[in-house]
Amino acid sequence: MPIIYNKNIDQHAVLAIWKIEETEEELLAGLQLKQHEHDIISSLNSGKRLLHWLSTRLLLRTMLNTTEYIDCQFDEHGKPYLVNFDYHISLSHSYDYAAVMISKEHAVGVDIEMIKHKIKSIKHKFLSDVELAQKQIGDNTDGLYVAWCAKEAIYKWHGKKGLEFKQHIHIKPFKLKNEGSLNALVELPTGTRELTVNYFKTKDGYMLGYVASNS
């Protein structure tokens, strides 16, 4: 399995990225699945959606380094969780890549996206005028993807519906690099939190953002 990135974020959290090169059959061969999961697979048909579903599960199995059955389900908010393992998890995928983040202690969120110029046409939907006025975001495709991945990672970290990208998550000014971090103010029902999001750009044109923090 081509894991192209594997990093211990801290003593509790691990992030891994996998380039999807296997066939459906090869991915299935590495998984233990029950009937409800086969039903999900049947509903996805063939193609990228199925490869993404299979690859995130196989990457999760590899990271947990277990031969036991992994019961990965989703709660009422759509947040993935493990029934029989004591880990926080976050899953993401885009085109030829799958990303998984796990932590024993902290809530986590990860997002990976292929960089495309069309993001400029939707920037006003997820960024405020104040954020767009930042020179490192503005009309900069990479900066826009950093902001998107950061907000998506925060949304997954929070794991509950009702958190709006434009209204509740505010990116503070940062220095745009190929790999760096930024801070964001997040308006939660329990009050405003400031979170640090790390990000990096891959050599073949993907952006990834991730966060690990107590919820």
Image: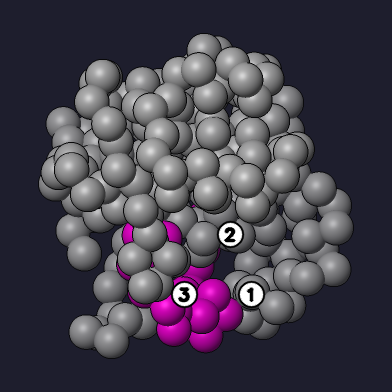
Secondary structure at badge 1 equals loop
Question: How would you rate the neighbour count of disc 2 (Cα within 10 Å): few for under 14, some for 14-19, many for 20 or more?
Answer: many
In this rendering, does residue 105 appear at all?
A: yes
Residue identified by numbered label 3: 169
Secondary structure at badge 3 equals strand
Secondary structure at badge 2 equals helix
Residue 159 among magenta residues: yes
Identify the image quadrant of residue 192.
Answer: bottom left
> Is residue 62 placed above or below 87 in the rendered structure?
above
Q: CA distance from mark 2 to mark 3?
A: 10 Å
> Is residue 133 placed above or below 213 in the rendered structure?
below
Three-letter code for the amino acid on which mark 3 is drawn: Ile
Look at the image and give the residue range highlighted in magenta: 156-179
The answer to the question of whether label 1 and label 2 lie on touching residues, with beta carbons closer than 8 A, is yes
Horizontally, residue 154 falls left or right of residue 24, namely left
Please give the label number shown on residue 147: 2
Residue identified by numbered label 1: 127
Three-letter code for the amino acid on which mark 1 is drawn: Leu
Three-letter code for the amino acid on which mark 2 is drawn: Ala
**Residue 65, position as x, y percentages in the image:** 26, 19
The answer to the question of whether label 2 and label 3 lie on touching residues, with beta carbons closer than 8 A, is no
